[in-house]
Amino acid sequence: MTTKILVTDDISSAGIDVLSTLPDATVDVQTGLSPSELLVAIADADALVVRSQTTVTEQVIAAAKRLKVIGRAGVGVDNIDLEAATRRGILVINAPDGNTIAAAEHTFAMMISLARHIPAANRDLLAGNWNRKKWVGVELRGKTLAILGMGRIGTEVAKRAKVFGMTVLGYDPFLTEDRAQSLGVQKSDLDSAIRAADFITVHTPLTKETHHMIDAGKIAMMKEGVRIINCARGGIIDERALADALRLGKVAGAAIDVFESEPLALDHPLRQCENVILTPHLGASTVEAQENVAIQVAEEIVQVLRDDTFEHAVNLPSLSPRQKERLAPYLALAEQLGLFAAQLAQGAPSQMTVTYAGDAADPDGGYLTRTVLKGFFGFQYSGEVNYVNALRYAEDAGLRVQEVRESRGRVYTNEISISFATDAGSHRVSGTLYSESGPRIVELDGYPIDMPIEGILVYTRHEDKPGMIGRIGTLLGDAQINIAGMQVGRRETGGEAVMLLTVDKSVPNNVIDEIASHDGIRMVRAIEL
Ligand SMILES: NC(=O)C1=CN([C@@H]2O[C@H](COP(=O)(O)OP(=O)(O)OC[C@H]3O[C@@H](n4cnc5c(N)ncnc54)[C@H](O)[C@@H]3O)[C@@H](O)[C@H]2O)C=CC1
Ligand SMILES: O=C(O)C(=O)COP(=O)(O)O
């Protein structure tokens, strides 16, 4: 089946060229689709590429039967229902730095235009006037600029403001004192920054926390005659409150590139204000930025479709090449242990502890735990569970997962252990990775075992008395099931013993039931890996 890459917003042809390099793929460019047309177009798409115009709702995601990845040729992903995509295991990637300079320069253009009334003076002159007195502006030098959100764009704006001789206050929970100092920015809290500022510019994403971060209450705290710029996202500033403050003169001017609803409605109150500069979401609209973001996102889409690799996922932690190399061998071990644990469990556990010890304990952004859960829930939901949605499956199942890291393994140089309890009992399964023989199971419910973690296994816990192993062997033999390998263990003579067998074919339920009903058998599980 050919791969379909659906592109629903205008992206640079440089990006389309990159997408077209994927063998056996069709690049289907359909811009300006209505919501119902999008539902049809997305149905058989493997990848979707958008900018800010396409709204990727839960309904769109539900209509997509094959979608693996959504690429955002730009930064903000607030037009994509991330939660719905994550639940469906769809990777969302963006192009985080391709348009940084374009957005920072647009912000600066807006700030200077506000300070010097350039658009209004231009309009006035074109109307036939020559009003030199009317358009006297202010200088940026010596003024205080508050930057709310000191990420990529905020930082570039700060650098430029410093060159213009401005005092820069930065508000961002992730701005460290050291970083602020190195940029010549004063780290500030939100209220102090907006109280002190002559100019305020926002550069956060639109989230629940930043929605209406600037509202009527915050505007009331600002200096009379403050000037406000929003080249980040509509909704960070309450537009109605801003329009009121502009009309009253509390805010001397506002330059707005992005709106709560785009395109901006004809009767929107900001259109009625004199002292505003409005642009139609042009922050990223430079030739250079559009090439950058289109190429960046297209290259990643091609990589994801080709071999599942990516760098800028929004809903999955990205790993450095070094981390990837280190983790690669542990992925099979973690997934097999998860799959083993799922078949060991009878009933749903509410708590699981995954312990990483020795060489398996390096920080990995939770990647191995996602892998364990992919195995665990993959047993029940097969192809539906992947790295993107594994944590959601755990949440939905009410499973709390705890990670423990120990610098040394109990016996081995690397160990991964999963322990959990259900109504039917507690279990713990541990594995290690031998460089020569791959993943092995090394402990089961407290008993030392050493077997490759693969194939078809039968696990029993039984009374440690003569004849048990023989009886189990006979029952399997009667069912024409050949035993290929065997490990037994016990803690003390005459107590409980365990046995792990590898067998050559699947063990039917009735054979398992027969073994279970045998005198002295306490537990039996068939486990397929
Ligand atoms: N007008 C346009 O065409 C463009 C708009 N944008 C918008 O600009 C936003 C920022 O872009 P980048 O700087 O590239 O993103 P970024 O991720 O590098 O920076 C965002 C910063 O906001 C901070 N932040 C998040 N929540 C915050 C809060 N509640 N209070 C204070 N700071 C908070 C983060 O810590 C981060 O440092 C994007 O999310 C996008 O919505 C981006 C590019 C072009
Ligand atoms: O990258 C962003 O977040 C932007 O807002 C740019 O939007 P656009 O791709 O120009 O629709």
Image (tube, rainbow, N blue to C red):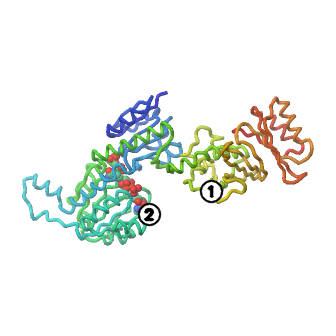
* Mark 2 residue type: Phe
Image position, residue 33 (x, y; %)? 36, 36
For marks 1 and 2, give the CA distance: 25 Å
Q: List the single residue furthest toward the top.
A: 1
Question: Under tag 1, what secondary structure?
Answer: strand
Q: Residue at x 75, y 50 (%)?
A: 443
Dot 1 beta carbon under 8 Å from ligand 1 = no
Q: Is residue 82 left or right of residue 343?
A: left
Q: Is residue 521 above or below residue 159?
A: above
Which one is in front, 175 or 270?
175
Image position, residue 294 (x, y; %)? 36, 42
Q: Is residue 177 left or right of residue 383?
A: left
Task: Return the residue at label 1.
Answer: 403
Question: Under tag 2, what secondary structure?
Answer: loop
Q: Residue at x 46, y 49 (%)?
A: 314
User: Would residue 210 be visible to someone looking at this image?
Assistant: no
Task: Return the residue at label 2.
Answer: 174
Near mark 1 (Cα within 10 A), the count class, few <14, some 14-19 or many ≥20, is: some
Dot 2 beta carbon under 8 Å from ligand 1 = yes
Q: Residue at x 77, y 35 (%)?
A: 503
User: Would residue 141 be visible to someone looking at this image?
Assistant: yes
Quarter where residue 200 is shown? bottom left
Q: Is residue 399 above or below residue 185?
A: above
Quarter where residue 272 is shown? bottom left
Near mark 2 (Cα within 10 A), the count class, few <14, some 14-19 or many ≥20, is: few
